[in-house]
Image (cartoon, coloured by chain):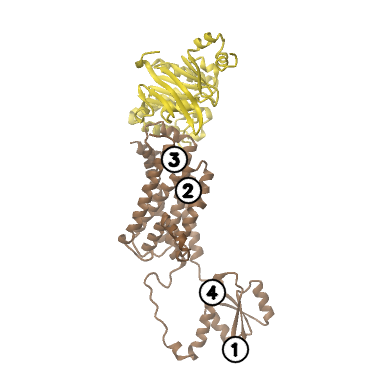
Amino acid sequence: MRIRALVIRIVRQFLHDKRSMALLIVAPLLVLSLMYLVFNGDTYEPKIGTVQLPEAVSQTLGENGADVTAYDSEAEAEEALAEREVDAIIRLDGAAPAVKLEGSDPARNRAVMAAVQKAMQAQQGPGGSPAGAAQAPVIEYLHGSEDMSSFDNFGPVLIGLFAFFFVFLIAGVSFLKERTSGTLERLLATPLRRWEIVAGYMIGFGIFTSIQAALIAGYTIGVLGSLMAGSFGCVLLIMLLLSLTALSFGTFLSAFANTEFQMIQFIPLVIVPQVFFSGLFDLESISPWLRWLSYITPLKYGADALRGVMIRGEGWSAIAPDIGVLLALTLVFMAANVLALRKHRKI
Amino acid sequence: MAAASEICVRARDVIRKFDDKKVLHDISLDVAKGGIFGLLGPSGSGKTTFVKLIAGIDEATSGQIEVLGTPMPKLAMMVRIGYMAQSDALYAELTAKENLEFFGALFGLRGSRLKQRMHEVMALVNLTDHMERSVGAYSGGMKRRLSLAIALLHEPEVLILDEPTVGIDPVLRKSIWDELQSLSRQGTTILVTTHVMDEADKCDRLGMLRDGRLIASGSPEELKSRTGSATIEEAFLYYGGARA
């Protein structure tokens, strides 16, 4: 009865507050769309300048994904390189080709090298050693495919991240406002119990975070066409649990902030590190003595499970441990919040 | 002192410390049932701290507080107490009606009973025409009145009002005091804090607080005659040691 009153109030507040509604629903979709455009674009075409290179070589370079510009003199090419008009210049040093890279962007360096290597293989191919031409390896994919884009790889982590971040922020600030506006104290002068406050918040905000989770997942998979190997139901379940964790975490942390600004200050402390451990970056390259941190970040469990379902098509049994951890974290944060409210009223 | 059954609030040797700072020093006080009890004192004297202990929001560091014979804080007692905080604890995004419905539901009011009470209290504070308006668009005085309406909603036996008339114009202030007096005649015990000395005259009994100490208590007439003062303000100065 009292929890229901609290839930109805939160829903009404939300419906009156168009801005928060937009932040919760529209913002993640917008950011995801931008990410999609950035990471799903065509592969970069390296711009290569050539200096007196045989026409055949230039042509093979062009066929292998390079944008080739021919220069008459080395000085001219060097100038173009310095002006960043080209990413690399190739000239013949005796019989062997010499490549000089602009070098400030590793991604472009790799693109140039890939194009050069492909071109050299193609040059050697027909007339080269028989062993090289004989057997091209057969390539198969256990998961994903040749067409898998970066977005397919990042997508599951990103939807988890956005669901987590926006819910954390809105729930945390709303709960904080309850304290700064004096309404929390007013609530404590009613028969409302501390656990009922926490439960009411979880349910009231839970309604909106569920809608958000469904929208984000549906949009990413249905509209943006992210790779989806497993079941949508599993994705929804993970998203919901991840949102609830963010909800309980945000409301709990707000107990340690006195103003909205202090709540924002938690972002670099508790959100940004989670991004590093979420799987956007390869965990293998993180120092082993720091790696244990990943086990206490809720986002990692959500992102792992989402990737498992969306990329590798894993089912319920594979994600159950992650779901379990998220559920446990939610309960721990909720209990901690009930305890934190003791600060305001002992009973 | 009055018999136990006649006592609404009984405080004994109440001390409240925040960290190491003592905000209330050994306060012992009885508030009789019915009537308006005024807690008079300047800002920072510990009025709000004291009424929060009585309302059961906060707990005394040592000493006892009983409301209607029950030691506080006690959750079950919240239904019998109406509390109006010093700051308007309202949800600005919601309409007055939605605020009332929320607090009403917390106190277990529902259906036609809730509707009836909502209209009664809103008529009382003269806000009936503004029922559907968003509280964010209310003036300071209107918010104060809505807070009062919410405190009255569940017909509490004990009404605790922390500076209820701050920012309210004199005409309305008078009508609110008339209303408090009529409520007290119907048997509600009203505990009100104020720093406005002329409001103190309207109370049946007074407690004077200064620097966390209860410096005097009694009816306004008693306090004035005992100190040979013409006004409550002079009496306060006398007890405060300014004219010893």
Identify the mark at residue A13; answer none if there is no mark. Answer: 3
Answer few, some or many: residues within 10 Å of disc 2's Cα (few below 14, many 20 plus, some between 14 and 19): many
Which chain is depicted yellow? Answer: B
Numbered disc 4: secondary structure:
helix
**Viewport quadrant of the C terminus of chain A:** top left
Subunit of label 3: A
Amino acid beneath label 4: Ala
**Number of residues whose C-alpha sits closer than 10 Å to that of mark 4, classed few (under 14), some (14–19) or many (20 or more):** some
Decide: is A42 above or below B218.
Answer: below
Single out the mark in the foreground, 4 or 3. 4
Work out whether residue A65 can be spotted: no
Q: Which residue is mark 2?
A: A169
Question: What is the distance, in whole Å, between disc 4 and disc 3 at their CAs?
Answer: 52 Å
Q: Is residue A247 left or right of residue A46?
A: left
The residue at the far right in this view is A75
Do badges 4 and 3 share one subunit?
Answer: yes
Q: Nearer the viewer, mark 4 or mark 1?
A: 1
The picture quadrant where one finds residue B160 is: top left
The chain containing the residue under callout 4 comes to A
User: Which chain shows up in brown?
Assistant: A
Viewer-closest of B189 and B149: B189
Q: Position of residue B75 (x, y in %)?
A: 36, 31
Name the disc covering residue A95, or none: 1
Q: Position of residue A63 (x, y in %)?
A: 52, 80
Q: CA distance from mark 3 to mark 1?
A: 75 Å
On the image, numbered disc 4 is attached to which residue? A111
Q: Amino acid at mark 1?
A: Ala
Residue type, mark 3 in image: Gln
Q: Amino acid at mark 2?
A: Leu
Q: Residues within 10 Å of mark 3 (few under 14, many from 20)?
A: some
- State the separation of the CA atoms marked 2 and 1: 62 Å
Q: CA distance from mark 3 to mark 2?
A: 16 Å
